[in-house]
Image (cartoon, grey):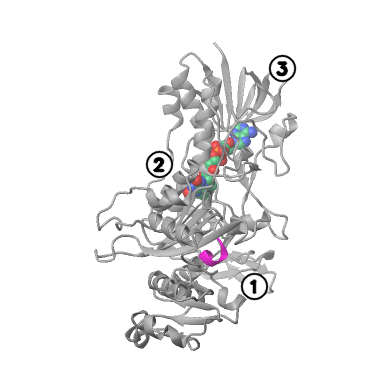
């Protein structure tokens, strides 16, 4: 009988333990967890704070007793592994509680699934007890207790990543005034800046005091509250702070044991998730992974990958050769009434890697409704697709909308996983009835538009084309009635699409035109007319006025 020790009892650790048990009834499996709880739903914690998940017990996915009785796993909570002795294949364990003790345990296979921890940068005042992080069940209990005392009225959330935003929303939902502070010029790093603008607008619409491009310079604890001082000089005084500025891998143990670690602290593993020691595997937030898009190394702390890696580690320990092919970073977050989702690489990442727009890649933004516009309740969504010049590689996608964002991003994530091209997106046969989609689903539509762009049938400009290219002339092709009802440009030319076949003669073929309509579809028709009349420089504004008005705050 061989013996497997697993360090870390949540996503990757618990997943490895249960899969391994299903594969090897005779394996001696010991799971060490330094905290009290194992296998809990970290991803649900913000929603317990916001009282959306009111029953705390619901967060405890597989309780310790179940892990023991159902799976025959020797679970030892409140037990921290403090040393790995690779030579003698032993770990040293320190227990917490009244009977503190230290002992050794031998292994045949060791799995490091120690996850990551929130970063607490060495900013002045950071050690204040009024600064919390949200990572574990006890962290959650602490915040919930503050809320139960009903004394807190104001909170500052530092960090606009997905946990920071989820906390912002949930704290707002329980009645607090929330300031959200982000040092970068946008929230949600997986989104490109123009897509993030939609989120900024929505966050502010929900009465959040949003500070962008303004990092914390220090915290000053006062008797009853705490002041957050920002680099701009602004001061925000609140009852408590939630710090959520990123995570670092818990790899100290592996490092001290001499395992290979990358510069960001991620444990290096091979395709079978084996570390530099053949008897030690690692999975979850603590490992370096292959970037599925670029095939080099990266770190992606997400629950889906951690669970998949757990299965692969268990398989390999059980003698089933199983490989991890990489992480593409598919993620989604609820941002008040929006869902914001992404998969693969964004444009910022491509540019950081030295790729140049219109030389190495192209991107499009489209807007469509969540389902057929004529069926009640359709809501707009915005979809950005980034792809290679020949369309054979999809680098990534981002979608923001009120509903049905998840199914579209998952379709594109699946397409990327199977190395589909943008042309394949046009061919996907997706389920349709009016309450659910359109006969041309937004994913098909993204494929069509990308294909048109590649084949030269349409040219979509960047969202900030009018700033970058002041020479460009706005050509608004909406009908007169539409202009009377709402927004109209102060500059530019209006020729309704219905008159364009005649009135194009009023336009100068030498000029650059940016064509606007409501959502970009009629602008495409207009650009086809103009192109076929010999115009060479006609670009379509991405996702039309619907997107432009969101970006530039127009009504
Ligand atoms: C609030 C929150 C919301 C999230 N929301 C999402 C989401 O919506 N979607 C998503 O994909 N991801 C989300 N995540 C991230 C996701 O939870 C993690 O990526 C995932 O849990 C990683 O799994 P893991 O097993 O590697 O690490 P963890 O789940 O962190 O587990 C590691 C465990 O190892 C234990 N440990 C560490 N060192 C030792 C030691 N020396 N000895 C014993 N035990 C040790 C730790 O106590 C910890 O319990 C969220 C995370 C948080 C905190």
Q: Position of residue 201 (x, y in %)?
A: 48, 71
Quick check: 190 above or below 459? Answer: above
Going from the N terminus, do you reach mark 1 or mark 2 first?
2
Answer with the quarter of the image where residue 89 lies.
Answer: top right
Q: Position of residue 276 (x, y in %)?
A: 70, 27
Q: Position of residue 353 (x, y in %)?
A: 67, 53
User: Which numbered disc covers residue 88?
Assistant: 3
Answer with the quarter of the image where residue 96 lies.
Answer: top right
Residue at 50% across, 69% down: 208
Q: Is residue 11 visible?
A: no
Which quadrant of the figure contains the N terminus? top right
Do the CB atoms of the residues marked 2 and 3 lie less than 8 Å apart? no
Answer with the quarter of the image where residue 471 lies.
Answer: bottom right
Provide the residue span drawn in magenta: 192-196
User: Which numbered disc covers residue 57?
Assistant: 2
**Label 1 sits on residue:** 235
Q: Is residue 25 visible?
A: yes
- For the residues carrying marks 2 and 3, which lies nearer the camera in this image? 3
Q: Position of residue 66 (x, y in %)?
A: 41, 28
């Amino acid at each position: 009988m061989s013996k497997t020790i697993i360090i870390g009892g949540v996503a990757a650790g618990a997943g490895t333990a249960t899969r391994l048990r299903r594969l090897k009834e005779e394996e001696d499996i010991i799971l060490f967890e330094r905290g009290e709880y194992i296998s809990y739903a970290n991803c649900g914690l913000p929603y317990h704070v916001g009282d959306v998940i009111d029953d705390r017990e619901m967060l405890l996915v597989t309780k310790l007793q179940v892990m023991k009785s159902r799976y025959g796993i020797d679970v030892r909570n409140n037990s921290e592994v403090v040393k790995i002795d690779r030579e003698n294949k032993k770990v040293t364990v320190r227990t917490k509680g009244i009977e503190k003790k230290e002992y050794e345990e031998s292994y045949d296979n060791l799995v490091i699934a120690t996850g990551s921890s929130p970063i607490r940068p060495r900013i002045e005042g950071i050690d204040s007890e009024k600064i919390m992080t949200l990572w574990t069940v006890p962290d959650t209990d602490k915040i919930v207790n503050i809320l139960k005392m009903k004394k807190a009225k104001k909170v500052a959330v530092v960090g606009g990543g997905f946990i920071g935003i989820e906390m912002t929303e949930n704290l707002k939902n329980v009645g607090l005034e929330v300031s959200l502070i982000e040092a970068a010029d946008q929230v949600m790093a997986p989104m490109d800046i123009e897509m993030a603008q939609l989120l900024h607008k929505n966050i502010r619409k929900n009465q959040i005091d949003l500070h962008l491009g303004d990092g914390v310079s220090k915290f000053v604890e006062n008797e009853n509250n705490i002041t957050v001082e920002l680099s701009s000089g602004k001061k925000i005084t609140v009852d408590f702070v939630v710090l959520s500025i990123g995570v670092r891998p818990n790899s100290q143990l592996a490092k001290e044991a001499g395992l290979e670690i990358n510069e960001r602290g991620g444990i290096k593993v091979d395709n079978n998730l084996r570390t530099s020691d053949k008897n030690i595997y690692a999975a979850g937030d603590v490992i370096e992974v292959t970037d599925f898009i670029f095939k080099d190394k990266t770190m992606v702390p997400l629950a889906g990958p951690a669970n998949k890696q757990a299965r692969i580690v268990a398989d390999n320990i059980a003698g089933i050769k199983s490989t991890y092919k990489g992480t593409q970073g598919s993620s989604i977050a609820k941002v008040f009434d929006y869902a914001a989702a992404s998969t693969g690489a964004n444009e910022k990442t491509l540019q950081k890697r030295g790729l140049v727009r219109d030389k190495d890649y192209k991107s499009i933004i489209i807007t469509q409704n969540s389902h057929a516009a004529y069926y009640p309740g359709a809501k707009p969504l915005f979809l950005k697709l980034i792809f290679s010049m020949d369309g054979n590689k999809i680098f990534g996608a981002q979608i923001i909308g009120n509903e049905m964002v998840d199914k579209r991003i998952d379709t594109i994530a699946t397409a990327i996983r199977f190395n589909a091209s943008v042309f394949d997106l046009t061919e996907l046969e997706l389920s349709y009835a009016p309450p659910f989609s359109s006969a041309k689903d937004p994913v098909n539509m993204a494929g069509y538009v990308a294909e048109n762009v590649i084949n030269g049938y349409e040219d979509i400009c960047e969202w900030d084309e009018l700033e970058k290219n002041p020479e460009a002339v706005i050509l608004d092709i909406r009908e007169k009635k539409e202009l009377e009802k709402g927004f109209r440009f102060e500059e530019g030319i209006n020729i309704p699409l219905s008159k364009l076949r005649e009135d194009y003669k009023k336009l100068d073929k030498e000029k650059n035109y940016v064509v606007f309509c409501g959502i970009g579809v009629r602008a495409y028709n207009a650009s086809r007319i103009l192109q076929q009349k010999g115009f060479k420089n006609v670009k379509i504004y991405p996702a039309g006025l619907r997107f432009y008005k969101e970006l530039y705050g127009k009504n």
